[in-house]
Amino acid sequence: MKNTCSLLLNYFFLILCILSTIGCDKGDTSDRDHQVFRYNEQYQISTLDPAFARNPPIIWPVNQLFNGLVQLDNDLNVQPDIAKSWEISQDALTYTFTLRDDVRFHKHPAFNTRDSTRIVTAADFVYSFNRLRDPKIASPGSWVLGNVASYNAVNDTTFTITLKKAFPAYLGLLSMRYCSVVPKEVTTHYGNEFRSHPIGTGPFKFKRWEEGVKLVLRKNELYYEKDEDGVQLPYLEAVAITFLPDKQSEFLQFAQGNIDYLNSLDPSYKDEILSASGTLRAKYQDRVQFEKVPWLNTEYIGFYLDSDTPEVQSALLRKAVNYGFDRKKMITYLRNGIGKPAVNGFIPKGLPGYDHIKGYEFDGTLSRKLIAQYIKETGDTSPEITIGTNSQYLDICEYIQRELQKVGLKVNVDVMPPSTLRQMKSSGELDAFRASWIADYPDAENYLSLFYSKNFTPNGPNYTHFKSATFDSLYEHSLSITDIDQRKKLYRTMDSLIIDKSPIIPLYYDEVVRFTQKTISGFEPNAQNFLVLKYVKKQKL
């Protein structure tokens, strides 16, 4: 108890220190200081280099610091960014981008110019893409250029990309933060330390980072985007990020008004802030805004099909698991109504290709029959499976464990740290694993790529090692089709095939959950759960 109290006191002292130093630039006023957007990041981040922006904790701050050729709006439509327009060749292989001529990098002495900055040119994108491909950099995002035959700076404002083969979703893929533009002068100056000295073009610029404690970004006075009234973005003066690892402490800070935003619904406080039906409790309604929208995130349990475990190899038993628990009850009682039961396919709601295909509804009787059939065919009278998970999803896995025990299947739950789970999932060391797939770009192909045989881990995202010649043929064919309606038909067929073969147990289609203080406006949710702060305003209390 003494250690716990000491830890909490340290947390509160840390918050006070951070709050007292956010507006520490000389000449700041209280009016400017109140325009600081504060949020907490539970997980430590290792870099602010966009070449390594592989997960939301990194992507969120990187999204404030950098820009690419294109960006996505809240409806996931591709919009201009540094590229003000583009043309696609008739064979859908060559993309010609016309760049803005008024985008400047954040100021830094390495530019060696009178005003310590310069205009972004097409040559900067050539350099940034080369860097993404450089084996010495070893970017996890190098795969986004895997289908690229060449790219070229025709002149300062014209940049071309030529693909090896047509890929209809390529523009959306270019919106990923991996594809951000970075300046050669600064990356060369810092080398590996660019990770902690980022210079980009984004609405906010890097101020300071005390790793594991605080990260501060300040308004970029050179930013090129304006709102519809011609007012320069962003409106905020700063963004301040703390790194409290405990979700309950984070919630306490939010409840006290010390941070502006909560991005998740954690079991430690879900019943405190939401009712069982998923509505905001009365005690918070006067000062907290609550929003939820569909999120391109499918939560699931995967089976490693190259396992030697007979239960995992059996389609009968995999289907028995899928029929053996009630997803609707799971969402109601364990997630306070947040999320939609995954009773259809793997493709989540919100993407072209999502359809109400017949998935797995709860059917305890059928689940028992399938288990009995497995026992009869194999002689294994005590079948069991083990699911690897982290503590955040323990309640869901324990619910499935209890429900499947009722139909005659023993389930073990192995809890491990998130990093261990990721590593063991990738290396095929887990017979079954709790996982999620958040869209890299807004096309259902991104979800179906998890079942393409050439994407076996560790070379791709096929963690289950599912293999089907029929699926592979359909998948490859879909890549050559530019008409979205035709692609949707193929997507639906592929999704139905996955459900039939059951390499996974779809759990639910997640929803973006946002709790914000009522002083915050202009903070719109989106289906990829991007953190877009350039339109955010903050009122005085």
Image (cartoon, grey):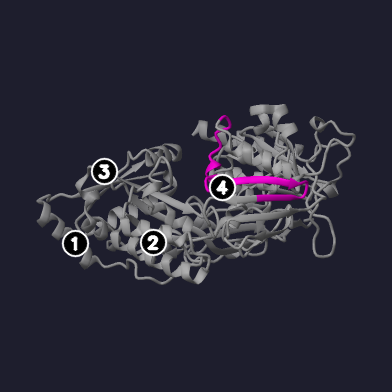
- Is 259 positioned to the left or the right of 277 in the image? right
Q: Tell me which corner region of the image, top left, top right, bottom left or bottom right, holds residue 226.
A: bottom right
Name the residue tied to disc 1. Answer: 370
Mark 1 or mark 3, earlier in chain: 3
Which class describes the residues within 10 Å of circle 4: few (<14), some (14-19), or many (20+)?
Answer: some
Which class describes the residues within 10 Å of circle 3: few (<14), some (14-19), or many (20+)?
Answer: some
User: Which residue lies at the image location 67% right of the left edge and 37% below the top edge?
Assistant: 214
State whether residue 176 is above or below residue 184.
below
Q: Secondary structure at mark 1?
A: helix
State whether residue 471 is above or below residue 246.
below
Part of the protein shown in magenta: 136-160
Marker disc for residue 474: 2
Q: Tell me which corner region of the image, top left, top right, bottom left or bottom right, holds residue 309.
A: top left
Q: Which one is in front, 64 or 459?
A: 459
> Disc 3 or disc 4, which is closer to the eye?
4
User: Which residue lies at the image location 37% right of the left edge and 67% below the top edge?
Assistant: 493
User: Which residue lies at the image location 37% right of the left edge and 58% below the top edge?
Assistant: 473
In space, the residues marked 2 and 4 are separated at their CA atoms by: 22 Å
What amino acid type is highlighted by mark number 4? Answer: Val
In space, the residues marked 1 and 3 are separated at their CA atoms by: 20 Å
What amino acid type is highlighted by mark number 1? Answer: Leu
What amino acid type is highlighted by mark number 2? Answer: Leu
In space, the residues marked 4 and 1 are separated at their CA atoms by: 47 Å
Mark 4 or mark 1, earlier in chain: 4
